[in-house]
Image: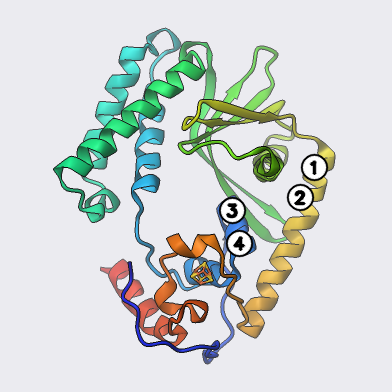
Amino acid sequence: MWPRPGCQRGLVPLAMALVPPETLSPSKISSFKDCALAFRFSAIDHLPEEPSPAAVRGTLVHLALEHLFEHNAADRTPDAARAALQQAVAEIQADPEFIELALDATAEQAFFDEAAALVEAYLEMEDPSTVHPIGLELMLETRLDGLRLRGIIDRLELDDDGGLVVTDYKTGRSPGPAYQQGRLGGVAFYALLCEELFGVLPSRVQLLYLGDRTVLATVPTQQATRSLRRKVAALWQAVETACEREDFRPRPGPLCNWCSFQAYCPAQGGDISLVEAARSTSAGQLAC
Ligand code: SF4
């Protein structure tokens, strides 16, 4: 956790209007909706964020499944999945975010055991030899009214009728019924990218929650992507206005418990005037 400086309440205006981010992605959209100030710290100020074991474990499992799907269909056996995980484990151990976790031997063993359990859960959810992938960790980008939309699709595949299927792996547990529609609404973003880039809507978008072996799936509609276009345009307008006014409001809630920016957040007793120095340090490290 970042060190907390002395308490300073109220936003401190910086000298210039803020520069909006160059792209919008599903994670930036939900970040802005969850807390505009955290969005600013991450997407505009580019302040470093502490890696969490859950996020790094998610990276590891995604990497393992990517390696599994590099094999031909007939070779995607359970043993190949376990070997893919071992390959990913070797790679993640050189990853700066994993190193930054500084896990001791016991925590590291638990970390890898949990990743192995998630890969086993995946194998219970589908037979990878029956999947027809046409893209893995696919970065898609399009322009919408001058705005760049960008998203990474974990797996793009064809169904038996030749339709596109977008699959997104989630290493946590599935949301309760009250939140499912919201999560599926987020995947309309991927449907929009497919519509823009391939000229066709996916026949299905599915979220594979390995944490509790649950699949949430939806059939995207043009009505949904039309609605999303309007929402994205409105959200971008709100981002630009907030940048012009340098007015990104904190929205305290449960997410504050995992927020890396508490030291800068007035709602948490932090000091937003420290952002300028942190931004310069971060930019200097990136340049090295
Ligand atoms: S601590 Fe909470 S209110 Fe402050 S920036 Fe983070 S999420 Fe937003």
Q: Classify mark 1 as within 8 Å of ligand 1 or not, answering yes or no.
A: no
Callout 2 crowding tier (Cα within 10 Å): few <14, some 14–19, many ≥20: some
The residue wearing badge 4 is: 34
The residue wearing badge 1 is: 224
Q: Is residue 80 above or below residue 153?
A: above
Question: What is the CA distance from the residue labelled 4 to the residue labelled 3?
Answer: 14 Å
Label 2 close to label 3 by CB (< 8 Å): no
Tag 3 or tag 4, which sits nearer the N-term? 3
**Toward the viewer: 154 or 196?**
154
Secondary structure under badge 4? helix
Viewer-nearest of discs 4 and 1: 4
Q: Classify mark 4 as within 8 Å of ligand 1 or not, answering yes or no.
A: yes
> Residue lying farthest right?
223
Of the residues shown, which amino acid type is indicated by label 2?
A: Leu
Question: What is the CA distance from the residue labelled 2 to the residue labelled 3?
Answer: 13 Å
Secondary structure under badge 1? helix
Callout 1 crowding tier (Cα within 10 Å): few <14, some 14–19, many ≥20: some
Residue 197's spot in the image, x, y percent?
67, 40
Q: Classify mark 2 as within 8 Å of ligand 1 or not, answering yes or no.
A: no
Q: Is residue 53 left or right of residue 222?
A: left
The residue wearing badge 2 is: 228
